[in-house]
Image (cartoon, rainbow, N blue to C red):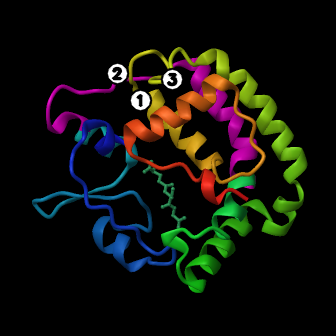
């Protein structure tokens, strides 16, 4: 998102989900995202990367964020986001799941934490209902389609990341301002939504 917002060039490399060797070589653990710097160093931690890139060229775009209402909304969304999106991501044509072994790695790891994906899938009606009701509560928190607080902040990074995750789910009902926001943020940050592959 930050590269798109700043209009900075980026070479995006997607690792297969079961590739442990590459991230461990770079940052000592199996985790993404990782920023590879031109001098050969590697930077982990998404918000460290966002802040670093925001400061690289021109004036920083993002205000600090940390609005309590947005943070509370995001925290509440955690009850339904993972159970809805995880079983769907592995069925979608995503680069990180391009091999059967990458899919199985993710399924094994996440099922150990969240339970069988088949069970999560079976909870779809209840989870969708919860998500759609919760989206109604998000609309009044959005000041503008171009930024949740009117001007860009780190809250936009967190909020759009969650809305983008949810875009893999068919049957989501976005209130008009939430719909305008997620479309505007996708265009502004050059991060496509998953609407076309929603299941
Ligand atoms: N605090 C880290 C968390 C990163 C994180 O949780 N990454 C997940 C993917 S979104 C990951 O790499 N998990 C390892 C795995 O699933 O094997 C950050 O914000 O960058």
Which sits in the foreground, 56 or 21?
56
Q: Badge 3 local density, few (<14 within 10 Å), some, or many (20+)?
A: some
Q: Quadrant of the N terminus?
A: top left
Mark 2: few/some/many CA within 10 Å (<14, 14-19, 20+): few
Which numbered disc flags the more N-terminal residue, 1 or 2? 2
The image quarter containing residue 36 is bottom left
The location of residue 112, given as percent across then percent down, is 72, 68
Which numbered dot is residue 111? none
Circles 1, 3 touching at the beta carbon (< 8 Å): no
Does 74 lie within the magenta span?
yes
Q: Nearer the viewer, residue 1 or 110?
A: 1
Using the image, tell me which numbered label, if any, was put on residue 145: 3
Q: Which residues are magenta?
A: 54-83
| Residue identifier under label 2 | 63
Mark earlier in primary sequence (2, 3): 2
The residue closer to the viewer here, 30 or 33, is: 33
Assess whether mark 2 and mark 1 are in contact (beta carbons under 8 angstroms): yes
Residue at (37, 23) in percent of width and height: 64
Q: Secondary structure at mark 1?
A: helix
Disc 1: residue Cβ within 8 A of ligand 1's nearest atom: no
147 with respect to 52 (left or right): right
**Majority secondary structure of the magenta segment?**
helix
Q: CA distance from mark 1 to mark 2?
A: 6 Å
Q: Which residue is mark 1?
A: 154
Q: How many angstroms separate mark 1 from mark 3 (CA)?
A: 15 Å
**Which residue lies most toward the left here?**
39
Q: Residue at x 36, y 70 (%)?
A: 23
Task: Name above or below for residue 79 compared with residue 150.
Answer: below
Look at the picture and state if 158 lies above or below 20: above
Q: What is the x, y in percent for residue 199?
A: 73, 59
């Amino acid at each position: 998102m930050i590269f798109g917002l700043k209009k900075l060039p980026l070479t995006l490399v997607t690792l297969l989900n079961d590739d442990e060797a590459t991230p461990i070589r770079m940052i000592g653990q199996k985790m993404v995202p990782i920023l590879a710097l031109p001098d050969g160093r590697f930077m982990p931690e998404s918000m460290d990367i966002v802040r670093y890139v925001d400061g690289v060229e021109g004036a920083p775009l993002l205000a600090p964020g940390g609005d309590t209402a947005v943070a509370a909304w995001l925290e509440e969304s955690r009850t339904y986001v993972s159970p809805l999106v995880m079983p769907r991501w592995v069925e979608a044509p995503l680069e990180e799941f391009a091999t059967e072994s990458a899919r199985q790695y993710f399924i094994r790891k996440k099922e150990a934490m969240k339970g069988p994906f088949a069970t999560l899938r079976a909870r779809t009606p209840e989870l969708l209902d919860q998500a759609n009701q919760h989206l109604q509560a998000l609309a009044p928190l959005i000041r503008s389609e171009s930024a949740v607080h009117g001007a860009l902040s780190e809250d936009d990074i967190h909020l759009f990341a969650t809305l983008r995750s949810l875009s893999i789910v068919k049957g989501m009902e976005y209130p008009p301002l939430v719909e305008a926001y997620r479309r505007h943020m996708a265009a502004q940050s050059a991060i496509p939504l998953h609407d076309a592959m929603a299941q």
